[in-house]
Image: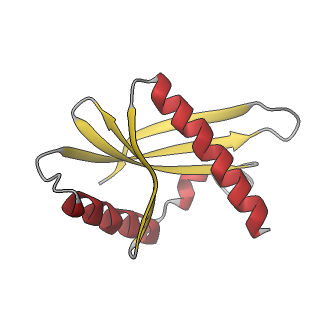
Amino acid sequence: MHKLNKTVGNYGEDLAEKHLKNLGYTILYRNFKCYLGELDIIAKNKDFITFVEVKARWNDAFGSPCEAVNYKKKFKLYNTAKYYIWSRNLLDYNFRFDVIEIVLNHNNDSYDLRLIENAFQ
């Protein structure tokens, strides 16, 4: 099951990156990892550096994908982002957290993708 989840996650991140590029975002980093956690995508959009959490699912039987970004996950993302900002001396930039949720279709290669800008603070 872990391997399937990783495959779905990677596919979702590929779709999200393509979507962000089509919207004019510049991808700065993908899968940034440190001892605090991982950030799926770090991108620049206009005056913002955006930390994007990608959630891909086969269905929404257990809730929408964005509902998986709970308090604990937000806290981890926030601290990892703080580390990224500090380690790269980016204190003069504006930042925000976005979520991209993707629901994949079992029957074909279609999917529903939704970008939630400034999803949490």
Percent position of residue 94, x then y:
19, 44
Image x and y of residue 78, in percent: 32, 63
Colouring method of the image: secondary structure
Extreme residue in the right direction: 107
Count of number-bearing discs: 0
Residue 62 appears left or right of 120 = right
Residue 76: which quarter of the image? bottom left
x%, y% of residue 100?
Answer: 52, 43
Seen in the picture, residue 59 relative to 18 is either above or below; the reply is below
Q: In the current view of this chain or complex, which residue is farthest to the bottom? A: 35
Question: With 104 as the anchor, is 45 left or right in this view?
Answer: left
Q: Residue at x 79, y 38 (%)?
A: 105
Q: Quadrant of the N terminus?
A: bottom right
Q: Residue at x 11, y 47 (%)?
A: 92
Q: Is residue 119 left or right of residue 93?
A: right
**Nearest the camera: 99 or 24?**
24
In the image, what residue occupies the spot 76% across and 49% down? 58
Instruction: Name the quadrant of the C terminus.
Output: bottom left
The image quadrant of residue 3 is bottom right
Q: Position of residue 119 (x, y in %)?
A: 39, 47
Q: Give the left or right position of residue 55, taking residue 82 as reference.
A: right
Q: Residue at x 31, y 68 (%)?
A: 79
